[in-house]
Image (tube, helix red, strand yellow):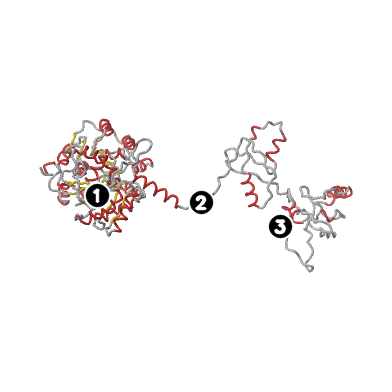
C-alpha cells in the first residue's frame, strides 16, 4: 500500500516524498484512514514505528480542508517531555511544509515571552507539555475553546511522570465535541480507565503485542561487577564499531559521572537530565544528532520519543526498575525498520530486574561470555528494615547531593537570628534584641521593659496599667497593622548624658573674644536671672520657659508682674534681649542651659 491509497492530499504527499517516505508503516496504514474520517483512534504500538506521522498527516489534511478566516488553536497535541514536544513540532513543520498552516511548540524551562508572542500572532496547531499549557491557560494567554482535534501522545509516560491529573484538568478546558486520538506503548489499568472516559467508540489500532521489543534490535547482556562498568563501557564502544551510542543511567549523578569517565577515555560525551537547563539539553541533543558527540548519556527523561536517525547502539548502564522502561530505551535504535544493538551491563544485584524484563518481553536476552571483566562479586544486595533492596547507585547519588549541599556557603539570611514577634498576650520581646538595637542607636536602654498588652483587655478603671502602655519605653499595641514590630522608644529627656550629647550637636561654633556678642534675638536662660526693666520684651503665650529647680519667690513675682505689663506694652518684640550672664566659677553647667535648647518660638497671627 502507498500513501496515495490512504487518501492524503498532494501537498502532504509531496512533503512525505521529500522526507524520504516511500510506503506507510503498519501503524500508519491502520491509523490514518479512520483519523481522516474524524473517528477517535486508540493506538497501541511500540516506540519507533511512526506514530507521529500516523496522527500528524491526518490533522494537517483536516485543518487544510476546512480553512478558517481567523487563526485559532484548532488542534492540540499533548506530550510528556520537552524533547518529544520539539520533535513533534519539527515533524509538523516537515509534513506541512507546503500547507499554509501555522504551528507552535510550548514547554517549560524557558521564558514564556517568545511562546506567548507566537500565540498572539495566531496558530492552527499547538504542541505542548502539560505544565506550560496549564500555566498559560490560567494566565488567560491561551484560548482552547476552539479545539477540534486532541491528541494525547505517550499516555503511559504521562502516568509514570505524574501528569495524569494535569491531563484530566486540561480535558475539562476543551470542548466536549472533538476528535480524540490516544497513543501509548503500554496499556496499564489507569490508562485503560482514561480511555473509557475520553474516547467514544474508538478505532483500536494495535501493531504487534504491547510492550514487545522491536524484532530488528540485537540484544545482549554483560554480567559485570558495578565497579568495572566504567571500564567495560568505553572498551565496548571502542571495539564494537559503535557509530554513536545512547547510554542510559539510573540517576542524574550517574549520568554526569559516566559522561566524565567517557571523556577521560577520549570519547566525546555529554549528559542530559532533569537538572540540566533546557538550553543545555537542546544543545547536547543537537550536537549528538549532528555527529559532534560520540555518546549521549541520559536518564529516562530521554527514553521516550527521541528520534535519532541511524542510532547504532543503546547501552543500559543501569537496569530500570520498571520493565516497560527497558522497551522504551532500546526503542531509540532500530527505528523505521533499521537495525540496531542494545547492550545491557548487569551487576549481581540487578539480576531480579533482568528477570522481570525477560518475563515482560517473553524472551531471554543472550548473555555475552568471555569478556575482560567477568562478574566475581556474588553477594546478595543489602536490604533495609522493611526488606526492600538498598540500591547502591541511589545511595551514591544521595551522598553526592549531600556533599554538594554541605559545600555551599551558608545563606546570609540563615546567619541572622529571626526577629522576636510581638506578643499580644503578655510576653515581652527578646531582651538581647532590644539591647543590641539601643546600642546601635546610641541611646540608653530602659531598665525594665513594660509587658506587651492589648488595650482592649485592660479595664478603664485601671488607669495606672493603661499609663504603662503609653509612657515612653513601653511597647505599643499595633494589632495586625504592624506585626512583629518593636515600637519601644525610651524617653530622650530621661538622662543628662543624652541631653549633653544633643546639646553638643546643636551648639553653634564658639566665638572668639573679638566676635560680637549675641544679638537681641537670643533668648535668656534661667542662669541669667529675671531682671526685666520697662520696655523689655517678654515671651508670648505658648513660649517654652525654663526655670531653675527651686526658683525664688521674687523671681516668680517678677515673672507675673512682667506678664501683667505685657498688655500695656503691646505685642511682644523680638529685640532688646541682653546676653546671658557669665556662669559663676565652680558652678556646674546644666544641660538645659544652652540657648539652642530653649529658643522661643512665636506665632504671628494676622
Q: Which residue is mark 3?
A: 506
C-alpha gap between disc 1 and disc 2:
51 Å
C-alpha gap between disc 3 and disc 1:
90 Å
Which label sits in the foreground, 1 or 2?
1
Which label sits in the foreground, 3 or 1?
1
Q: Which residue is mark 1?
A: 374
> Closer to the N terminus: mark 1 or mark 2?
1
* Numbered mark located on residue 282 in the image: none
Q: Answer yes or no: is residue 187 visible.
A: yes
In the displayed structure, does residue 186 sit left or right of residue 410? left
Q: Which residue is mark 2?
A: 412
- Residue 381 location, quadrant: top left
- Looking at the picture, how far across and down is residue 205, in whole percent? 18, 36
- Residue 352 location, quadrant: top left
> Closer to the N terminus: mark 3 or mark 2?
2
Label 1: how many residues lie within 10 Å, few (<14), some (14-19) or many (20+)? Answer: some
In the depicted view, which residue is nearer to us: 361 or 198? 361
Q: Residue at x 65, y 41 (%)?
A: 475
Label 3: how many residues lie within 10 Å, few (<14), some (14-19) or many (20+)? Answer: few
In the depicted view, which residue is nearer to us: 3 or 452? 452
- Looking at the picture, how far across and down is residue 156, in whole percent? 27, 38
Label 1: state its secondary structure: loop
CB-based contact (under 8 Å), mark 3 and mark 1: no
- Looking at the picture, how far across and down is residue 256, in whole percent? 33, 52
In the displayed structure, does residue 37 sit left or right of residue 321? left
CB-based contact (under 8 Å), mark 3 and mark 2: no
Q: How many marks?
A: 3
In the depicted view, which residue is nearer to us: 480 or 254? 254
In the depicted view, which residue is nearer to us: 490 or 510? 490
> Closer to the N terminus: mark 3 or mark 1?
1
- Looking at the picture, how far across and down is residue 264, in whole percent? 30, 58
Label 3: state its secondary structure: helix
Amino acid at each position: 500500500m502507498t500513501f496515495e491509497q490512504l487518501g492524503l492530499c498532494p501537498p502532504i504527499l509531496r512533503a512525505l516524498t521529500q522526507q524520504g517516505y516511500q510506503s506507510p508503516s503498519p501503524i500508519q496504514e491502520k491509523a490514518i484512514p479512520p483519523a481522516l474520517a474524524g473517528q477517535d483512534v486508540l493506538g497501541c504500538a511500540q516506540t519507533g514505528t511512526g506514530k507521529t506521522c500516523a496522527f500528524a498527516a491526518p490533522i494537517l489534511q483536516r485543518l487544510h480542508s476546512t480553512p478558517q478566516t481567523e487563526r485559532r488553536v484548532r488542534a492540540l497535541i499533548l506530550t510528556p517531555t520537552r524533547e518529544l514536544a520539539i520533535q513533534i513540532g519539527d515533524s509538523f513543520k516537515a509534513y506541512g511544509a507546503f500547507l499554509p498552516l501555522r504551528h507552535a511548540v510550548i514547554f517549560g524551562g524557558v521564558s514564556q515571552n517568545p511562546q506567548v508572542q507566537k500565540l498572539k500572532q495566531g496558530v492552527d496547531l499547538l504542541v505542548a507539555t502539560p505544565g506550560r499549557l496549564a500555566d498559560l491557560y490560567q494566565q488567560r494567554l491561551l484560548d482552547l475553546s476552539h479545539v477540534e482535534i486532541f491528541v494525547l501522545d505517550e499516555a503511559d509516560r504521562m502516568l509514570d511522570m505524574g501528569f495524569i491529573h494535569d491531563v484530566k484538568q486540561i480535558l475539562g478546558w476543551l470542548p466536549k465535541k472533538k476528535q480524540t486520538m490516544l497513543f501509548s506503548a503500554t496499556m496499564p489499568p489507569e490508562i485503560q480507565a482514561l480511555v473509557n472516559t475520553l474516547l467514544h467508540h474508538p478505532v483500536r489500532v494495535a501493531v504487534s503485542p504491547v510492550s514487545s521489543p522491536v524484532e530488528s534490535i540485537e540484544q545482549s547482556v554483560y554480567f559485570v561487577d558495578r565497579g568495572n562498568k566504567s571500564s567495560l563501557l568505553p572498551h565496548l564502544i571502542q571495539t564494537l564499531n559503535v557509530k554513536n551510542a545512547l547510554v542510559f543511567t539510573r540517576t542524574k549523578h550517574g549520568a554526569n559521572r559516566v559522561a566524565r569517565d567517557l571523556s577521560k577515555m577520549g570519547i566525546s560525551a555529554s549528559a542530559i537530565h532533569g537538572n540540566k537547563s533546557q538550553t543545555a539539553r537542546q544543545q547536547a541533543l543537537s550536537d549528538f544528532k549532528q555527529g559532534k558527540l560520540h555518546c549521549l548519556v541520559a536518564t529516562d527523561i530521554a527514553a521516550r520519543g527521541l528520534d535519532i536517525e541511524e542510532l547504532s547502539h543503546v547501552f543500559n548502564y543501569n537496569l530500570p526498575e520498571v520493565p516497560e522502561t527497558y522497551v522504551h530505551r532500546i526503542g531509540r535504535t532500530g527505528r523505521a525498520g533499521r537495525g540496531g544493538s542494545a547492550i545491557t551491563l548487569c551487576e549481581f544485584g540487578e539480576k531480579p530486574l533482568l528477570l522481570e524484563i525477560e518475563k515482560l518481553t517473553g524472551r531471554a536476552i543472550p548473555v555475552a561470555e568471555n569478556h575482560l571483566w567477568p562478574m566475581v562479586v556474588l553477594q546478595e544486595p543489602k536490604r533495609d528494615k522493611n526488606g526492600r533492596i538498598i540500591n547502591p547507585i541511589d545511595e551514591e547519588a544521595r551522598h553526592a547531593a549531600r556533599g554538594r549541599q554541605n559545600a555551599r556557603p551558608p545563606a546570609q539570611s540563615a546567619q541572622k537570628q529571626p526577629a522576636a514577634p510581638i506578643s499580644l498576650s503578655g510576653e515581652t520581646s527578646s531582651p538581647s534584641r532590644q539591647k543590641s538595637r539601643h546600642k546601635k542607636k546610641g541611646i540608653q536602654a530602659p531598665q525594665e521593659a513594660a509587658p506587651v498588652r492589648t488595650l482592649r483587655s485592660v479595664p478603664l478603671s485601671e488607669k495606672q496599667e493603661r499609663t504603662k502602655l503609653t509612657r515612653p519605653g513601653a511597647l505599643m499595641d499595633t494589632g495586625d497593622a504592624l506585626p512583629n514590630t518593636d515600637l519601644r522608644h525610651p524617653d530622650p529627656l530621661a538622662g543628662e548624658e543624652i541631653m549633653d550629647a544633643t546639646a553638643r550637636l546643636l551648639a553653634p561654633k564658639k566665638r572668639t573674644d573679638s566676635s560680637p556678642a549675641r544679638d537681641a534675638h537670643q533668648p535668656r536662660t534661667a542662669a541669667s536671672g529675671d531682671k526685666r526693666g520697662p520696655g523689655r520684651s517678654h515671651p508670648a503665650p505658648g513660649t517654652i520657659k525654663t526655670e531653675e529647680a527651686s526658683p525664688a519667690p521674687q523671681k516668680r513675682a517678677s515673672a507675673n508682674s512682667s506678664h501683667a505689663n505685657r498688655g500695656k506694652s503691646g505685642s511682644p518684640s523680638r529685640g532688646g534681649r541682653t546676653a546671658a550672664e557669665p556662669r559663676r566659677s565652680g558652678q556646674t553647667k546644666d544641660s538645659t542651659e544652652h540657648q539652642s535648647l530653649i529658643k522661643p518660638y512665636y506665632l504671628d497671627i494676622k
